[in-house]
Image: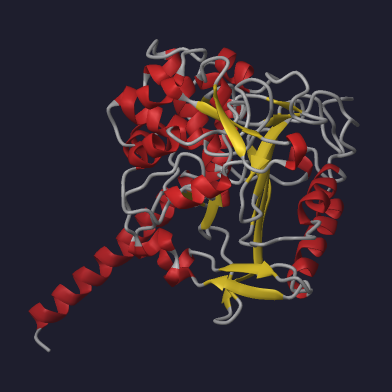
Amino acid sequence: MSACRLASLNRRAALGVLLGLILSLASALAQLPSASPAEAGLSAERLERLSRYLQSVVEKRKAAGLVALIARRGRLPYFQAFGSLDRETGAPMPKDAVFRIASQTKALTSTAVMMLMEEGRLLLDDPVSKYIPEFAAARVAVPLEEKGAKGYAAVPVKRPITLRHLLTHSAGISYGYGPAREEYRAAGIQGWLLAGRDQPVGEVIKKLAALPFDAQPGEKFVYGYNTDILGYVVEIVSGLSLDEFFAKRITGPLKMKDTHFFLPESKLGRLASVYGLDEKGVLTKVEDARGSVYVKGPRRCFSGGAGLLSTAGDYARFLQMLLNGGELDGARLLSPKTVALMTVDHLDGLYGPEGFGLGFWVTEKLGRDGRPGTVGSYGWGGAYHTTYWVDPREQMVCVLMTQLLPADGSDLHGKFRSLVYQAVIESGDQ
């Protein structure tokens, strides 16, 4: 080999090493800073209980793999991965594994709506028909129960559906399994997964507006397409597609480098496969990473209700922004007053034992639902059995990522929550 050829190869190798170091540094800078458990007011010994439990979940084949993260006082005292990305290949679960976060997307879409409110471009009590005229003729399906009659009667809504109804899931709009379920099935709009549709989300939402809903606006908590509708409102008001809005206004400023609607091919090796617990409780693969619609496309329908992929580290940055009152590392997305409005109850008893804010459950009274926690905490989760919450009094963010669908009978979330709080030895309540 000539000296020139050897020098050229050496330069390429050096550039490759330099690029790797730069990317590694960028990744490190995008993470919250680390801390020892003691510095964060947590017990290292008690965190080991949490680790042993999560490891046992994998060993007992109750999940293929997990990533668990606890941030406290703005730093990371606990960030661990367990099990495998894919049991069949044996690929270990990395801390930066990519997960389908489904309904955890709703928090970002809710934030986008509140950002537009802060800019004076919309109001929460605006009727959705102001932005999507098809909703002006909204109807509700009322079941026919007299003398054993079957079916339903479609009646007009008593009041306009507002953006706040959508944010609180009190618009009466389900995922298509209510009294008019056969109409939803015939229309091809049923279930939360929209990522595989070969059409913009706006076309789905306009078609949805013509179907009868499950309850009158403001009268019942009905979980459904509400936040997908809000995602389309964001597109209309901002003039950007939802993926562009997120990238420019949320995930970009917050350095959430691994949060996408559809996965870049270069990151396929970090996407976890999906497993489920069958009727006998046996762990079975449901979806291989390479077969995922989030990889194969058609990459046209951006679901504001359930469309994103993310990592535990990325999502923790988003939650830390909320905990900080709308700002992280110099990037301010929201005012503290707006975050406060989002994270208090708006439903006055419609959401069971807890309150519900503008996109989150909210703990109003400790003990009402029997879970450890703190008044003022808020959170949600996703269909693939991911979960998160923010505890402002304890200055704590908690994220648990896995890919488990269905997860019938799983007590993972309850035990994770209990084991997090038993590790707190310096409490904000003291």
Quadrant showing the C terminus: top right
Residue 68 pos. (x, y %): 67, 54
Q: Residue furthest front?
A: 147
Residue 361 pos. (x, y %): 70, 32
Residue lying at 43% horizontally and 32% vertically, measured from the top left: 209
Q: Nearer the viewer, residue 421 or 307?
A: 307
**In the displayed structure, does residue 308 sit left or right of residue 62?**
left
Up the image or down, 22 lies above or below 305; here it is: below
**In the displayed structure, does residue 79 sit left or right of residue 250?**
right
Tell me the quarter of the picture where residue 250 sits: top left
**In the displayed structure, does residue 170 sit left or right of residue 260?**
right
Residue lying at 77% horizontally and 56% vertically, measured from the top left: 412
Q: Is residue 32 visible?
A: no
Up the image or down, 90 lies above or below 120; here it is: below
Up the image or down, 167 lies above or below 294; here it is: above
Q: Nearer the viewer, residue 183 or 50?
A: 183
Residue lying at 82% horizontally and 35% vertically, measured from the top left: 373
Q: Nearer the viewer, residue 187 or 86?
A: 187
Residue 77 pos. (x, y %): 70, 46
Q: Nearer the viewer, residue 64 or 226?
A: 226
Q: How many marks?
A: 0
Quadrant showing the N terminus: bottom left
Residue 388 pos. (x, y %): 66, 43
Residue lying at 15% horizontally and 75% vertically, measured from the top left: 7
Q: Is residue 234 visible?
A: yes
